[in-house]
Image (cartoon, rainbow, N blue to C red):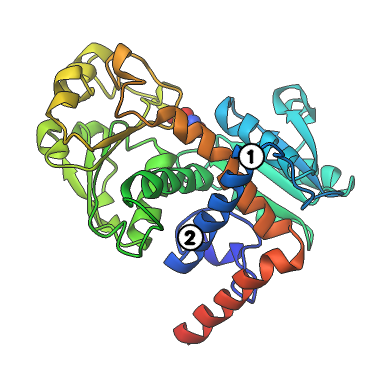
Amino acid sequence: MSPELQLDSHGRLRHLLTLEGLDAGLLTEILDTAEEFDKTLRGPEKKLPLLRGRTIINLFFEPSTRTRTTFELAAKRLSADVLNLQMAASSTSKGETLFDTLKTLEAMQADMFVVRHEASGAAHFFAQHAAPGVSILNAGDGRHAHPTQGLLDLFTIRRYKSGAGRPGPDCFRKLRVAIVGDVLHSRVARSDIHGLRALGTTDIRVVAPPTLIPAGIEQMGVRVCHRIDEGLDGVDVVILLRLQKERMLGAYLPSMSEFHRDFGLTRKRIEALRRDAIIMHPGPINRGVEIEGDMAYGPQSLILQQVQHGIAVRMAVMAMILGPPQRRAADGRRGLRRARSAA
Ligand code: ASP
């Protein structure tokens, strides 16, 4: 799947399909923009007029709680008109193709589609066929990518791991990160790894039984650990992944309780972490499986902060793609500089 599809000729974001191929400059710009929006969201007037008159359609072919609602809220905070389509109740269930669904909704003059689909590559398909001026945001495609989750994870890590003041360029370089659980089926793991690698993190461990590790994942620049104590040793960040039961066609695990025993974040394992280590999970949590039930919102957990950061991050992406030109200008100039230095 071509990552270039998502940038225009000036290096600006046109679609957001994957974090693969986005460089540190652009990722940092998205995170900085999200910081600005996060400030606004904490103030009394949470709504900005940046996308007034724009139409954004949420097309969710798979269930979602956090991602759909935070995309909707983000669009509303930017004053866009938002439509939420329940695709199970739409014409696709009568056999309409994805292409015809896209063209039908484009005819209503939508500016952006936020797409979640169980097929890896669905968002790329929409982007390849979208009319000029129509943008696609990938809200999760199969086990491939979940770029806004990756961005909100980076935002959360940067916020809590950069010490006081503005995050410096070194913030990500020194981190030790463990990604624990169902790496095989996880689009979140892939997006997190692409983002962390682009920002300079070199110590990334993926921690799971062999059945839940995809072949060749080392080529993404991570270390595979099949023992959790080795994987968690000295880490600054623990990212837990949900067991994706809906994507498991065969038997990957003896049982949930054995997974919890061998790979779950138990109270004992949390107590053995560094005191300043942070714990994240994209949700929904299987309590008592990925993490001991009553530890989910413990003092080191940032799981609810991740949800909150999702709004600012999604506002940033929408505004950088659809916002007024002055909001996109800096991005374009940096994109040009990047393109020139790469030439
Ligand atoms: N909500 C995330 C996703 O859609 C994580 C998960 O479902 O496990 O990929």
Query: Does the beta carbon of the residue at mark 1 sit less than 8 Å from ligand 1?
Result: no
Q: Earlier in the sequence, mark 2 or mark 1?
A: 2
Residue at position x 56%, y 75% in the image: 335
Residue 323 x %, y %? 74, 58
Residue 74 x %, y %? 67, 40
In the image, 204 versus 40, the foreground residue is: 40
Spatial separation of the CA atoms under disc 2 and disc 1: 25 Å
Residue at position x 76%, y 22% in the image: 89
Say few, some or many: other residues with alpha carbon within 10 Å of mark 1 (under 14 / 14 to 19 / 20 or more): few
Residue 104 x %, y %? 85, 43
In the image, 190 versus 78, the foreground residue is: 78
**Residue highlighted by disc 2:** 27
Say few, some or many: other residues with alpha carbon within 10 Å of mark 2 (under 14 / 14 to 19 / 20 or more): some
Specify the quadrant of the image occupied by residue 334.
bottom right
Is residue 51 rendered to the left or right of residue 328?
right
In the image, 300 versus 283, the foreground residue is: 300
Residue 166 x %, y %? 41, 58
Name the residue type under label 2: Leu
In the image, 316 versus 162, the foreground residue is: 162
Is residue 141 rendered to the left or right of residue 158?
right
Name the residue type under label 1: Gly
Residue at position x 59%, y 25% in the image: 63
**Residue highlighted by disc 1:** 43
One can see residue 138 in this view: no
Count of numbered badges drawn on the protein: 2
